[in-house]
């Protein structure tokens, strides 16, 4: 190793390069447009049709939208480097595999946080619609946004791992979506499974952890769950890159 597990200056440089790549890529704008279009519908439907000032519908289905958005934003982070041959150039530089993976992930994370920040608009709309005497449950609102941020980061880490598996971005997208969808559907189906299987599915799936955050409950077990998912997928991506060097 050069400087331990990774080199901070190299990670920052790669993260900045990745973030610039997003703002120069039309596909990123298309993915964000579709996400905001669908999430806007999920937000507006209960607000204007049912007169419910809540993000509940958003929290129910936004993770499924993120299961598409995160792979779309992360599928090319490594596969494009592998396909174009620029990964070989990176491999000859004094960079560790952790430098590459963390740089790509932090660039994605910055873009994802911009995406989540855009959802603050919905909170402001709710604040304007709700009577001052009633007020908003800010714990629920901010907890929901934090939950969506963590889900997107975990799904993005899965996308980076999938991107390390193939030079084909379509293959990377499908693999990432399947991994994200499994995490999504496990939480939805936990109540249908018997005994220990149901408990395992409930913990492995994202639903129960996201539900706690959406209630404004900040439990360290939920934070550990999401951070563990992120760390596991990034570790697998590093191992895959190391295997490519040999």
Image: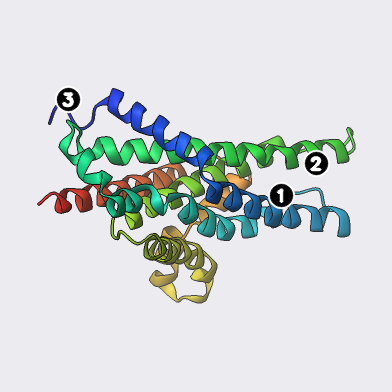
Residue for point 28% across, 39% down: 100
The residue furthest front is 84
Q: Nearer the viewer, residue 51 or 83?
A: 83
Mark 1–mark 2 Cα distance, whole angstroms, equals 9 Å
Secondary element at image label 2 = helix
**x%, y% of residue 33?**
65, 50
Q: Is residue 207 visible?
A: no
Give the answer, above or below, for where 224 lies relative to 5. below
CB atoms of marks 1 and 2 within 8 Å: yes
Badge nearest the viewer, 3 or 2: 3
Q: Which residue is mark 2?
A: 126
The x and y percentages for residue 59 are 64, 53
Local packing at callout 1 (Cα closer than 10 Å; few below 14, some 14-19, many 20+) is many
Q: Callout 3: 10 Å neighbours few (<14), some, many (20+)?
A: few
The secondary element bearing badge 3 is classed as loop
Q: Please state which of residues 74 and 225 is positioned toward the viewer in this rendering.
A: 74
Q: Which residue is mark 1?
A: 55
Q: Report how far apart the C-alphas of labels 3 and 2 lie in the structure.
A: 48 Å
Q: Nearer the viewer, residue 20 or 46?
A: 20
Q: Which residue corresponds to mark 3?
A: 3
Residue 120: percent from the left, percent from the top? 69, 37
In the image: residue 24, left or right of residue 107: right
* Nearer to us: label 3 or label 1: 3
Determine whether, in the image, residue 53 is placed left or right of residue 230: right
Q: Please, is residue 126 above or below residue 59 in the view? A: above
């Amino acid at each position: 190793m050069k400087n331990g597990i990774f080199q901070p200056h190299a990670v920052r440089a790669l993260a900045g390069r990745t973030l610039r790549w997003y703002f120069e890529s039309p596909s990123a704008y298309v993915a964000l447009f579709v996400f905001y279009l669908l999430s806007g519908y999920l937000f507006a439907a209960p607000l204007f049709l049912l007169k419910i000032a809540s993000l509940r519908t958003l929290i129910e289905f936004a993770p499924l939208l993120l299961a598409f958005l995160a792979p779309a934003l992360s599928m090319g982070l490594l596969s494009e480097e592998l396909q174009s041959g620029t990964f070989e150039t990176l491999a000859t530089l004094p960079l560790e595999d952790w430098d590459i993976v963390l740089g790509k992930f932090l660039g994605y994370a910055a873009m994802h946080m911009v995406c989540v920040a855009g959802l603050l608009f919905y909170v402001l709309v709710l604040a304007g619609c709700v009577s001052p005497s009633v007020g908003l449950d800010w714990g629920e609102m901010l907890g929901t946004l934090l939950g969506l941020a963590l889900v997107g980061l975990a799904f993005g880490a899965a996308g980076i791992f999938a991107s390390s598996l193939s030079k084909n971005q379509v293959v990377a997208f499908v693999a990432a979506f399947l991994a994200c969808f499994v995490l999504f559907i496990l939480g939805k189906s936990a109540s249908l499974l018997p005994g220990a299987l149901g408990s395992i599915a409930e913990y492995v799936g994202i639903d129960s952890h996201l539900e706690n955050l959406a209630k404004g409950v900040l439990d360290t077990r939920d934070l550990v769950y999401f951070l563990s998912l992120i760390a596991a997928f990034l570790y697998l991506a590093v191992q895959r890159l190391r295997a490519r060097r040999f």
